[in-house]
Structures are given as C-alpha cells and as structure tokens.
Image: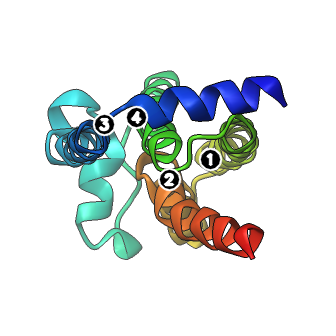
C-alpha cells in the first residue's frame, strides 16, 4: 500500500500540462506506427487484406518473419498504450492489472494467430483478420480507458 501511495504522490508532482503533452505525444506515436506500418513492420498480410481477400489465394510469406513482426508491433503498441493508461490512471494496482491483461491477451491472441496461419484457408480469413487486428492495433487502449474511468468513478462513490 505504501508503494501505491508513493506512486500516486510522484505522479501528482508532475504538472498537468506535461501529462497532457505526454499523452498527445504517445497518441501521435501510435498514429505514426499506423501511418508508417509498411516501412516499419512490412508483412505480406497488409496487401492481402487491402484487396478482395475473400476470393484470393493467401500470399506467400515467411511464417517466422510474420510472427516476429506481429509480436514486435504488439509490444510497441502495448508499451505506448500502457504508458498512456498509467498517465491517466497513476496507480500501481492499475498498472499491474493492465500489464497482466496485455500479457494474457498476447498469449491467447498470438497462439490463435499462429494456429490460424499454419492452417490458412478461406474460411479462416476473417477470423485471422480480426485476431491480427487486435495484435497490431491499439484496440485494448480504446477498450480499457473507458472501463478504467468507469471503475475509478464507481470506486469514488
């Protein structure tokens, strides 16, 4: 409990303007990752899902490179997202939960992604698309911020 208090006190000392600027910088970093995804994280599935993939043959890809690129992108997006969440909700308890959540989600999603990639057939195209979407986009940030805000408001009552 003492660490919780210390973390909150340290964050309270940081000026609000710095917190806002930090969050804006982190959000623009997430946007930049999306904007420069082809050069930062080249992968065969980017072009595949940009076309009418329902009727296409899956592209030739190196399984290890695709998995590695996806993992790297998930890690970068996760770190930026966790930093945003920590600035918004400066609590070690919240930080531990969010890191745990991202870790469990990673294990589940990358396992499903790997299995579907190894058995890539047209009936799995959409499932793979959505699993990949959760791995390469900061969707958990969009889900967790309102949930944590609601939790904070409920706890204050």
Label 2 environment density (alpha carbons within 10 Å; few <14, some 14–19, many ≥20): some
First-in-chain label (2 vs 4): 4
User: Seen in the image, is 111 located left or right of residue 43?
Assistant: right
At a point 75% along the width and 23% down the height, the residue shown is 3
Callout in the foreground (3, 4): 3
Q: Can residue 122 be seen?
A: no
Callout in the foreground (4, 1): 1
First-in-chain label (4 vs 1): 4
Q: Which residue is mark 4?
A: 61
Q: Position of residue 96 (x, y in %)?
A: 73, 35
Give the quarter of the image for residue 146: bottom right
Q: CA distance from mark 3 to mark 4?
A: 48 Å
First-in-chain label (3 vs 1): 3
**Which label belongs to residue 113?**
1
Q: Nearer the viewer, residue 75 or 119?
A: 75
Callout in the foreground (2, 4): 2
Give the quarter of the image for residue 94: top right
Q: Which residue is mark 3?
A: 15
Q: CA distance from mark 2 to mark 3?
A: 37 Å
As displayed, is residue 125 above or below residue 157?
A: above
Q: Secondary structure at mark 3?
A: loop
Q: Position of residue 33 (x, y in %)?
A: 24, 40
At a point 15% along the width and 39% down the height, the residue shown is 36
Q: Which residue is mark 2?
A: 132
Callout in the foreground (2, 3): 3
Badges 2 and 1: C-beta atoms under 8 Å apart?
A: yes
Q: Nearer the viewer, residue 115 or 29?
A: 29
Give the quarter of the image for residue 56: bottom left
At a point 43% along the width and 52% down the height, the residue shown is 138
């Amino acid at each position: 409990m003492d660490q919780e208090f210390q973390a909150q006190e340290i964050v309270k000392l940081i000026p609000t303007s710095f917190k806002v600027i930090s969050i804006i910088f982190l959000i623009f970093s997430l946007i930049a990752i999306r904007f420069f995804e082809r050069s930062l994280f080249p992968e065969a599935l980017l072009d595949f899902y940009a076309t009418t993939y329902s009727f296409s043959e899956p592209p030739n890809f190196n399984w290890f490179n695709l998995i590695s690129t996806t993992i790297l992108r998930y890690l970068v997006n996760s770190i930026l997202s966790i930093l945003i969440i920590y600035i918004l909700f400066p609590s070690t308890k919240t930080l531990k939960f969010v890191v745990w959540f991202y870790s469990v989600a990673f294990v589940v999603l990358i396992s499903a992604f790997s299995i579907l990639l190894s058995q890539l057939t047209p009936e799995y195209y959409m499932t793979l698309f959505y699993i990949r979407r959760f791995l390469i986009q900061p969707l958990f940030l969009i889900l967790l911020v309102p949930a944590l805000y609601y939790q904070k408001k409920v706890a204050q009552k």
